[in-house]
Image (spheres, rainbow, N blue to C red):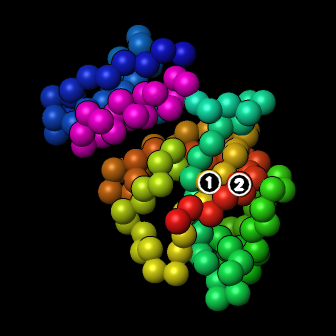
């Protein structure tokens, strides 16, 4: 699929990225960004993802425990994330949180709405995923993956 970038004057003069030919303002494939560089980076990542047998590289913010282990931020918090093992998303409805089954990842290590205290970004490989558009104040596009492998902790 080919994508286009344009300055969306009808949406706070934000840069937008959408599939060529998809002019639906309510399209789930329409993504808005504050600056052109972010829009270009997103377009590049969706047109040419770093693929590993139908997988793409993404990022996930996790809790760094005192013992050095890694854990999810909010859902299934007692689980520890192992390195280099494929993990299948499980259903853990949690009071106070919208239900969105899948490992919540991002295309860039960027989540301005979340604290970075005692947290680190990890590089992950994901597959069986879908894009989920969120407001820019929540990091923009999320990726909800049914399979995830932790590759490396970023410093």
> Compared with residue 121, is residue 51 higher up or lower down, i.e. above or below?
above
Q: Quadrant of residue 153?
A: bottom right
State the image coordinates of residue 20 (x, y, percent, origin top left). Answer: 41, 13
Q: CA distance from mark 2 to mark 1?
A: 6 Å
- For the question of whether residue 102 can be seen, the reply is no
Furthest-front residue in view? 155
The image shows residue 56, relative to residue 115, as above or below, that is above
Q: Residue at x 21, y 28 (%)?
A: 8
Furthest residue in direction bottom, as rendered = 66
Magenta stretch, overall SS: helix
Left or right: residue 16 compared with residue 108: left
Q: Residue furthest right?
A: 85
Q: Tell me which corner region of the image, top left, top right, bottom left or bottom right, holds residue 111.
A: bottom left
- In the rendered structure, the answer to whether residue 18 lies left or right of residue 132 reads left
Magenta residue span: 30-48
Residue 131 in view (yes/no): yes
Return the x and y of residue 145 as percentages of the image width and height. Answer: 68, 47
Residues under numbered marks 2 and 1 in contact, where contact means CB atoms less than 8 Å apart: yes
Residue 40 colored in magenta in the image: yes
Question: Which element is circle 1 on?
Answer: strand
**Residue position for label 2:** 151
Rendered view: 5 above or below 108: above
Residue 29 on the magenta span? no
Q: Secondary structure at mark 2?
A: strand
Residue at (44, 74) in percent of width and height: 116
Q: Nearer the viewer, residue 36 or 7?
A: 36
Say which residue appears at 78% left-offset and 62% top-offset: 83
């Amino acid at each position: 699929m080919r994508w286009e970038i344009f300055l969306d004057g009808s949406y706070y003069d934000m840069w937008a990225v959408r599939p060529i030919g998809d002019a639906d303002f309510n399209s789930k494939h329409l993504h808005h960004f504050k600056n052109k560089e972010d829009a270009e980076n997103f377009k590049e990542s969706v047109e040419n993802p770093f693929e590993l047998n139908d997988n793409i590289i993404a990022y996930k913010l996790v809790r760094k425990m005192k013992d050095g282990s890694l854990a999810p931020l909010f859902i299934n918090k007692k689980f520890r994330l192992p390195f280099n093992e494929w993990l299948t998303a499980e259903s853990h409805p949690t009071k106070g949180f919208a239900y969105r089954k899948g490992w919540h990842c991002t295309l860039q290590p960027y989540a301005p709405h979340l604290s970075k205290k005692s947290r680190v970004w990890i590089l992950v490989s994901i597959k069986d995923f879908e894009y989920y558009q969120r407001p820019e104040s929540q990091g923009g596009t999320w990726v909800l993956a049914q399979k995830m492998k932790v590759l490396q902790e970023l410093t």
